[in-house]
Amino acid sequence: MNILVTGGAGYIGSHTVLDLLNRGHQLVIVDNFANSDRRVLERLFLLSGVQVPCITVDICDEAALRLVFEQAQAQGQPFDAVMHFAGLKAVGESEREPLKYYRTNVAGTVVLLQLMQEFNVQHLVFSSSATVYGDPASLPLTEQSPTAPQSVYGRSKYQVEVMLADYCRANPAFSAIVLRYFNPVGAHPSGLIGEDPKGVPNNLLPFISQVAVGRRAALQVFGTDYPTVDGTGVRDYIHVMDLARGHSQALERLFGTPGWHVYNLGTGSGISVLQMLETYRRISGQAIPAQLAPRRPGDVAACYADASKAATELQWQASLSLSDMVADTWRWQQRNPNGYEAELIAEVSHAGDVGA
C-alpha cells in the first residue's frame, strides 16, 4: 500500500515507519519538525536502505497538505491509508497553551480529514492516548472504561476520537482505528533511533536516561505514599517496537472493516517508578541519584491496560520485557548522549534489515 504518515519523523512515528517498510509498504512522511529531528531520516535510511520521501508540512496548512495529496495522485500512486501521528503531546504545555493544542491536534485533524474526503482516502489509523481515561475508577482499563480526560492534551485527543466516530457514522465506507496506548518507552535495538525529547523530558524513562548519562543531576520521584507496591506511581510501559507493530497490524485490520474501532495497546501490567529506576540501575551499572518529592497535582496512583481486544481482533500482544525496554533505551542513550548527532551517521554501516 501507499501510506501517508503524518508526524513520521517523531519518536513513535519513526519506529512505525521502519515496521511498515519491513512489511513492504510504500510511504510518504509529512512532518513540521516541531518535536522531531531531521537527522532521523538519515537513520531510517541506514536501517532500511529505503529513502522515504519526507515533506516539511504543518497539518494545519491546508494548501501545503493538499499539494502532497495532489502529487501522489498525479504520480499515479494515490494514498491507500493515512497513519496519523502528527500532534502536540506535552500535558503541562497543553495547560499553559490550550489553543495551541486544539489548533494542532483537533483543527489539524479536521484539515486532514477534509483532504482525505476530497481525495477519496477511506482508511485512517489515529494515534490516541490512555490519557483519555483520566483518573481510572477501576483497573485494568478496557476500551469500555469511562473517559474523563484531565488535561487539555487528553481532551484534544478525545475530541479527535469523537470527531472520527461522527465522521464514520456519516460516511459508511470510511474506516478509522483509534489506538489508545499507554506509556511508550525503549528504542530500536540498533541504538540508531530512539526518543530525543526537546528540553526537559516530560516522561520518566528519558529523564532517568539523561541522569544516567550525566546530562542531569538527579531524578525526582514525585510521590511515595500512593497505594501501590512501593508507594510510587505505577504505569503500563510498552516498548516502542511493540507499539510500532501494533500500528502495522491495525492498518491491516482497516481494510474490510469500515466504521470506528478503538483498541488499547499496553502490556496489561504496571511498573512502579522505583521498579523502573532499579531496573535501569542494574542494566546500566550507573548509580542514578534520585530525590524523593511530594506528589504532583493531577498524577494518578496507577494506570494499566486490558489489551485483550487487540489480542483478539488485531492478533497483537506486547512481547518485549521491562529489561528489553531499559536495555534498548540505555543503548540508544549511550550512542546518542545528546540526542541525534550527525557524527554517528558516518560511523554506522548499512544495517540491511529494517527489523534488525
Image (cartoon, rainbow, N blue to C red):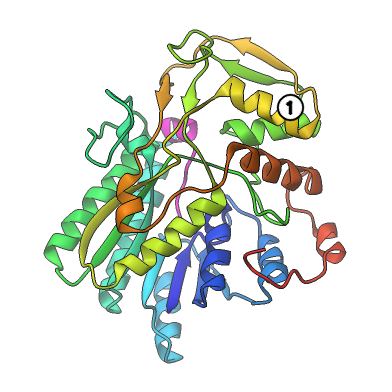
| Residue 159 in view, yes or no | yes
Question: Does the magenta-highlighted stretch encompass residue 200?
Answer: no
Query: 48 or 51: which is nearer to us?
Result: 48
Q: Residues within 10 Å of mark 1 (few under 14, many from 20)?
A: some
Q: Quadrant of the N terminus?
A: bottom left
Q: Position of residue 128 (x, y in %)?
A: 37, 48
Q: Position of residue 124 (x, y in %)?
A: 33, 65
Q: How many marks?
A: 1
In the rendered structure, the answer to whether residue 336 lies left or right of residue 113 reads right
User: On the rendered structure, is 48 left or right of 225?
Assistant: right
Tell me the quarter of the picture where residue 84 sits.
Answer: bottom left
The residue segment tinted magenta is 86-96
Q: Residue at x 64, y 77 (%)?
A: 50
| Residue 198 in sight | no
Viewer-closest of 158 and 304:
304
Can you say whether 173 is above or below 217 in the image?
A: below
Q: Is residue 299 left or right of residue 215?
A: left
Residue type beneath disc 1: Arg
Q: Secondary structure at mark 1?
A: helix
Residue 152 at x, y = what percent? 36, 35
Vertical order, 13 against 254 (above or below): above
Q: Residue at x 74, y 27 (%)?
A: 281
**Residue 87 x/y as whole percent:** 45, 51
Q: Is residue 288 above or below residue 178?
A: above
* The C terminus lies in quadrant: bottom right
The residue drawn where x is 28% and y is 24% is 138
Residue that mark 1 sits on: 281
227 to 321, vertically: above or below? above
